[in-house]
Amino acid sequence: MKVGIDMGATSKGTSALLDLEELLATRLLVQGNSGSGKSHLLRRLLEQSAPWVQQCVIDPEGDFVTLAEKFGHVVVDAVRTEAELTRIAGRIRQHRVSVVLNLEGLDVEQQMRAAAAFLGGMFDADRDHWYPVLVVVDEAQLFAPAVAGEVSDEARKISLGAMTNLMCRGRKRGLAGVIATQRLAKLAKNVAAEASNFLMGRTFLDIDMARAADLLGMERRQAEMFRDLGRGHFVALGPAVSRRPLPITIGTVETSPRSVSPKLMPLPEASDDARDLIFKPGADEARPLVRRPPPPPTPTPTADILAQLSRPRPQPEASAEPMFPVFDEAERDALIDTVMRGILDDPDAAFRSVAVLYQDFLVRCRISRVPGEPLPLVGFRRKLAVARAGVDKETASGETWQQALALSESLTDDIQGVFLIVAQSAVSGEPCPSDAALARAYGSHSPSRARRLLTYFEEQGLLVVRTDFRGSRIVAFPDLGCETAPGDPNRPDELAGDRTAAE
């Protein structure tokens, strides 16, 4: 069924129709400086498409919560734990409810973590709930920054991974990303490049105008036109709206944001008691104590300074015993490796969450008397991914394995272990792991998820999958210069078989 969303009027006076079904398959990128009308455009799109498709709005400023009154959107306050947001997102996909994730009141890093958890819950929903959803992300440069900012690397990595999944792999799961940004230069290129439809608004910086012109297939000399666009005027291109750059004017909306642009208004009449209004504290105000800085010390005479410099230097005192006992780092690492092996020897460990495994790890470390500060959660995730690969000491000390570890750092924490297991087989020349073994490493019972992970690694340019004439799978790593031996992808998982026999 073809549904045309009326976005406004074209330069020729006709209606600017957006093919909703095509938009769900090809995604949309909106760009424009502050005040160009991006939020107005997104509101028009949401209002016009509300009767036809489920919607999810990632709202960092709380501007879209007004959709709830007229269109029935459920407002989800992001002041929750990441686990709660993930579970809520799964239920949203199951029951097909349109929502607005309100991130107002959180700092930037908290917003990134909350949005990543929510998008991750929608992305990981069961296949039976893969209904089409229009996922609108306002101020997308906050969640997919092109360069590292003031937030932690962990927050940036999980947020960028969630946005990449939305734009790169979300289509097969029914997730259609619509992202809006103030500057293309601030948005990660691998996220922006996945959009096939574009609506470019007013912008002034040369780098943004040139990039907008490139995305629309225009010549560089035509990029100056983006400076002259008025508020609510955009240039559209894409299979869902027009095959050629088309100027359009966004139509009116039925709801309004809670925040509005500042308006000029006359100042109040001058009052004779203006000084009292400013400097006299109110009845409910406590007068703060004024802390004056202490007077500067009396300068030391020059003769005293020269006398101090001429004195012989005293002998250093013998170092006192350290407050905390000194321990051997190598011995500590060996104890941690022993604890990790004990966790992975449990067949059920593959299907437990990282949080549960981390708590078990801390308890085992106390039992084994591991000295020093406990390993943080970030370090535990990395050690868990490396330990699951099962690399021996000789292979681990080789340069090829160190390159494989470096390649894995570009992936999110939850899939690093799967990548390293395949890389270990290639470095050691062992048969390619089966789908069942890769699914267990991912913490899933679904072999299809393992195949999708290999496809994702191949899309990122990390490896190449091929099949020989016997139907066996071979995975090659161009950057490492090695490949796995042929392996049957349908081979049952040996560890799973051992577990069944034990039961």
Image (cartoon, rainbow, N blue to C red):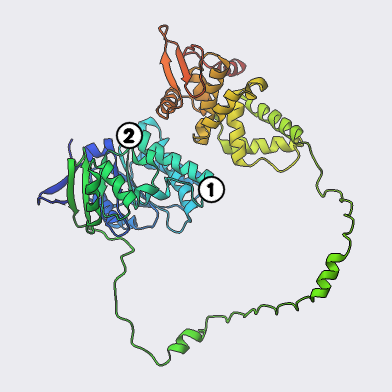
Element assignment for label 1 = loop
Please indicate, yes or no, whether residue 5 appears anywhere in the rendered image. no
Q: Which residue is found at the position 71% from the left and 78% from the top?
A: 296
Residue wearing tag 2: 171
Depth check: give the residue in front, 399 or 233.
399
Image quarter in which the C terminus is found: top right
Circle 2: residue type: Arg
| Outermost residue to the top | 470
N-terminal label among 2 and 1: 1
Between 269 and 187, the one nearer to me in the picture: 187
Asked if the residue under mark 1 is in contact with the one under mark 2, i.e. CB atoms within 8 Å, the reply is: no
* Closer mark to the observer between disc 2 and disc 1: 1
Q: Is residue 55 left or right of residue 218?
A: right
Residue located 52% across and 26% down the image: 418
**Residue closer to the observer: 45 or 411:** 411
Q: Residue 318 location, x and y as percent?
A: 89, 51
Checking the image for residue 152, the label placed there is: 1
Q: Classify mark 2: residues with Cα within 10 Å, few (<14), some (14-19) or many (20+).
A: some
Residue 254, placed above or below residue 242 = below
Q: CA distance from mark 2 to mark 1?
A: 29 Å
Horizontal side, residue 430 vs residue 221: left or right: right
Above or below for 203 versus 460: below
Give x and y (percent) for residue 225: 22, 52
Residue 399 quadrant: top right
Tag 1: residue type?
A: Ser
User: Which quadrant of the structure image shows residue 344?
Assistant: top right
